[in-house]
Amino acid sequence: MTLLPVSVAPELVTGEFRKMIYADLREVILIEHRAYEFCWTEGIFRDCLRAGYYCQVLAAPNGGRIQGYGIMSAAVGEAHIFNICVRPELQGRRLARRVLDHLLGIAHTEAVKTVFLEVRESNKPALRLYAGAGFCEIGVRPGYYPAPKGRREDAIIMAREL
């Protein structure tokens, strides 16, 4: 798959949300591997699709490439955001906020009262994103994430009431 250069300006301001499908997984996995050192496997994405989670992609208009994606579950008044990712070359353009807002809109439609998520303590941009969207830290999971050199990293647990 060939990735387009960052200079493709129209895709940066437009895009359409749609359900992620199995055919998207090749592109999603490529984005995931470029964005994270410790990334999700294809099996995890397949499990999320199979479970009926809200797996959404933000795609360029007219069936264009995927700019970002988000995965969330919702049941019994709670939602859990599991993954939000934007192509590395498009980061810093508020696309992650668009994905987050889209997932929160789905949660609202599903009568969710509280949305939860976990984020690496070292992921400062994500922590700023979530705090800016009204999420508050409610706890820590010590050693939750794998880290370089065999170490472990804490997860910050955050929540937001809708």
Image (cartoon, rainbow, N blue to C red):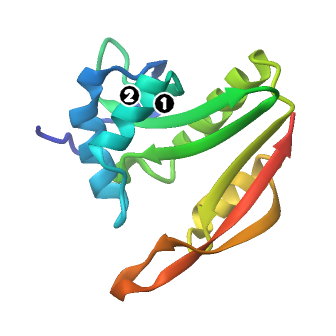
Tell me which residue sits at (62%, 73%) in the image: 121
Q: Badge 2 local density, few (<14 within 10 Å), some, or many (20+)?
A: few
Seen from the viewer's position, the closer of residues 61 and 34 is: 34
Question: Please, which residue is most extreme toward the left here?
Answer: 1
Seen from the viewer's position, the closer of residues 35 and 26 is: 26
- Badge number at residue 13: 1
Seen from the viewer's position, the closer of residues 79 and 28 is: 79
114 left or right, relative to 148: right
SS label for mark 2: helix
Quadrant location of the C terminus? top right
Give me the C-alpha separation between circle 2 and circle 1: 6 Å
Three-letter amino acid code at the position of disc 1: Val
x and y, in percent, of residue 113 in the image: 87, 31
Q: Is residue 102 above or below residue 4?
A: above
x and y, in percent, of residue 16 in the image: 47, 18
Q: Circle 2 sits on which residue?
A: 10
Instruction: Say if mark 2 contacts mark 1, CB within 8 Å.
Output: yes
Name the quadrant containing residue 60: top left
13 left or right, relative to 38: right
Q: Is residue 16 above or below residue 88?
A: above
x and y, in percent, of residue 90 in the image: 40, 47
SS label for mark 1: helix
Tell me which residue sits at (28%, 56%) in the image: 34
Tell me which residue sits at (82%, 19%) in the image: 111
x and y, in percent, of residue 158 in the image: 76, 56
Name the quadrant containing residue 151: bottom left
Res 58 seen here: no
Res 74 seen here: yes
Three-letter amino acid code at the position of disc 2: Pro
Tell me which residue sits at (71%, 35%) in the image: 79
Q: Is residue 21 above or below residue 71?
A: above
